[in-house]
Amino acid sequence: MLRRPIPGPTLLLALGLATAAAQAQPAPQPVADFSAGPGNGSYSFASWTPRSLPELLRGPAGAPVQAVTGHLFLPPLKPGEKVPAIVFVHGSGGVYSAMLEHWPRLFNAQGWAFLALDAFGPRGVQGTADDQSQLPVTAETADAFAALRLLSTHPAVDATRIAIIGVSRGGITATRTAMARVLAAQQLPGGLRFAAHVPLYAGGCVGATRARVKPGVFGPAPMLWVHGDADDYTAMAPCQDYARRIGEAGTPTEFVAIPGAHHKFDADDTRRITLRQAQRTREDCPLETDVETLQVFDRVSGQRVQGEAFREALKQCGAQGATVEGNRAAREQAGQAMLGFFRKVFAR
């Protein structure tokens, strides 16, 4: 099953919804692992669907199996060669053309494998921009670890050099997979973990999905944050603060701000589109969750938030409406930043 060209962008793509092109990919081939060394194609593999952070932290043992899809893109390979790899996690719109064309082409040119993860399609979800409750964000975190496990079995992939990129909602997964307690709960074999984490115009920098940063919460794998300073969907300033705190707690962290870039700047459609119903979290939302105790705190006052105060805070933190806009120059800048970062990570 070879890579198929993706038709040009549509309005649905600009709105962040799954495109007909993405939905028209070949039916995925079921696999238990990649030990047979399969080539480019779409593959269905086992994951699970934790409904909350506590459930994710209990781990997958005994959980019902949920099939998810990965689109595998391999570079030209030499006999016996083992190459680095990247897992790419989509945002609220699901699979979009850049993650099946632009990004795999860029990274394959470096000699790196690429797996585009589809968490929505196999679960019957079209998109979550207007209603994030359709699928808990913990599901994509579970899927990312399942993808890591799968890629690590490919004879052409170096299991010690697998990184993750997560865009928008997927950026929550890019950060959560870096958390030591979350990683430990997944029961991965042989110390398997992601070698690096890249939240790209990430969500989860405000609100209860944000972790309370303390030494030991995040592991030693380096992180690169890339964000547009014109983003009104997931504001940049809270992500800068989050990244700074994570760095101060001991995780090597870099932050690249792209001037003038809006949300989903890597999309092919360069029109600015208003998403009037899109759910977002206010930039000034002070909530954060302590991953050790699973209690929610106000990071400004340091006080615990619970009961009716928590429910009221959630209401106050919610907002609606945002814009998205593809930007070729911003995408190029982000790509070069990621290439430089991964070259350092994969050289270790």
Image (cartoon, rainbow, N blue to C red):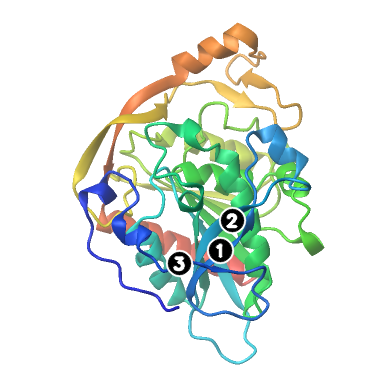
In the rendered image of this protein, does residue 94 appear above or below residue 133? Answer: below
Q: Position of residue 242 (x, y in %)?
A: 55, 36
Whether residue 37 sits left or right of residue 2 in the image: it is right
Judging depth in this view, the residue of 223 and 76 nearest the camera is 76
Judging depth in this view, the residue of 284 and 277 nearest the camera is 277
Kind of element beneath mark 2: strand
Q: Position of residue 144 (x, y in %)?
A: 60, 54
Give the image quarter of residue 333.
Answer: bottom left
| Image quadrant in which the C terminus is located | bottom right
Q: What residue would you read off at disc 2?
A: 67
In the rendered image of this protein, does residue 8 appear above or below residue 58? Answer: below
Whether residue 293 sits left or right of residue 86 in the image: it is right
Q: What residue would you read off at disc 3?
A: 27
Query: In the rendering, which numbered label is found on residue 44?
Result: 1
Mark 2 residue crowding within 10 angstroms, few (<14) / some (14–19) / many (20+): some
Q: Earlier in the sequence, mark 1 or mark 3?
A: 3
